[in-house]
Image (tube, coloured by chain):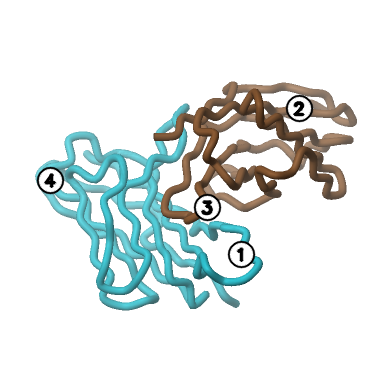
Chain colours: A cyan, B brown
Amino acid sequence: DGGITQSPKYLFRKEGQNVTLSCEQNLNHDAMYWYRQDPGQGLRLIYYSQIVNDFQKGDIAEGYSVSREKKESFPLTVTSAQKNPTAFYLCASMGRAQTSGTTGELFFGEGSRLTVL
Amino acid sequence: GEDVEQSLFLSVREGDSSVINCTYTDSSSTYLYWYKQEPGAGLQLLTYIFSNMDMKQDQRLTVLLNKKDKHLSLRIADTQTGDSAIYFCAAALYNFNKFYFGSGTKLNVKP
């Protein structure tokens, strides 16, 4: 079945460590997104990529880094520079925006919950 | 940028209608969405509406858009306990570069 897979589902990190969250999709989607979700707040955009080898900062990119070497993969690294990394992280993808009839539907993974000890 | 706002909680009885409201600030928003999130999971698209529409109905779901007031609502008819979840309103411009999400409304359906 086509979809987006995020791993790990739960991750614990010690302060000062970098961690990488995986996001893989087999939907043949061009665009991929990383969001952060905190209780009582909406989803905030960290990074997005419209095409392979290109990505853009979102609204809260500080302390995070990404790469887009393959169409299927968009890993997110939470660096030690991120002061408050404990959150629920969601990866999403979308088909080509210029596709006829596109509705702009985002397909989400199941999320990764990161806790800093 | 766009600012999307929703109330945080709504509680209804099973069988009643639920109405979840959302406001947005950018009149350029072309596409407006409602997503549902079950506990500990990702979001799933429920329905969407284009800015040139006033209303859209899809089975138990009715979306109303007041473009003048920048107000969007989602009505769920005959609400069931399985509808208990967090509902997010989202807005996007025509190029889909960014999607702006509200804080989510937690719907609690009492039996």
- Please name the amino acid that badge 3 sits on: Tyr
Q: Position of residue B30 (x, y in %)?
A: 58, 46
Quarter of the image where the C terminus of chain B is located: top right
Q: Chain for mark 3?
A: B
Q: Secondary structure at mark 4?
A: loop
- Please name the amino acid that badge 2 sits on: Val
Q: Secondary structure at mark 2?
A: strand
Which mark identifies residue B42?
none
Comes first in the chain, label 4 or label 1: 4
Q: Separation of disc 3 and disc 4 at Cα?
A: 36 Å
- Please name the amino acid that badge 1 sits on: Thr
Comes first in the chain, label 3 or label 2: 2
Name the residue tied to disc 3.
B94
Q: Chain for mark 2?
A: B
The residue closer to the viewer here, A44 or A117, is A44
Q: Are callouts 1 and 3 both on one chain? A: no
Q: Position of residue A95 (x, y in %)?
A: 52, 68
Q: State yes or no: discs 4 and 1 in contact (Cβ < 8 Å).
A: no
Q: State yes or no: discs 3 and 4 in contact (Cβ < 8 Å).
A: no
Q: In the image, is residue A89 above or below residue A75?
A: above
Q: Chain for mark 4?
A: A
Name the residue tied to disc 1.
A102
Q: State yes or no: discs 1 and 2 in contact (Cβ < 8 Å).
A: no
* Residue located at (43% from left, 49% from top): B98
Q: Separation of disc 1 and disc 2 at Cα?
A: 27 Å
Q: Secondary structure at mark 1?
A: loop
User: In the figure, is residue B25 to the left or right of B52?
Assistant: left
Which mark identifies residue A80?
4
User: In the figure, is residue B10 to the left or right of A90?
Assistant: right
- Using a 10 Å C-alpha cutoff, classify the residue at mark 2 as few (fewer than 14 neighbours), some (14 to 19) or many (20 or more): some
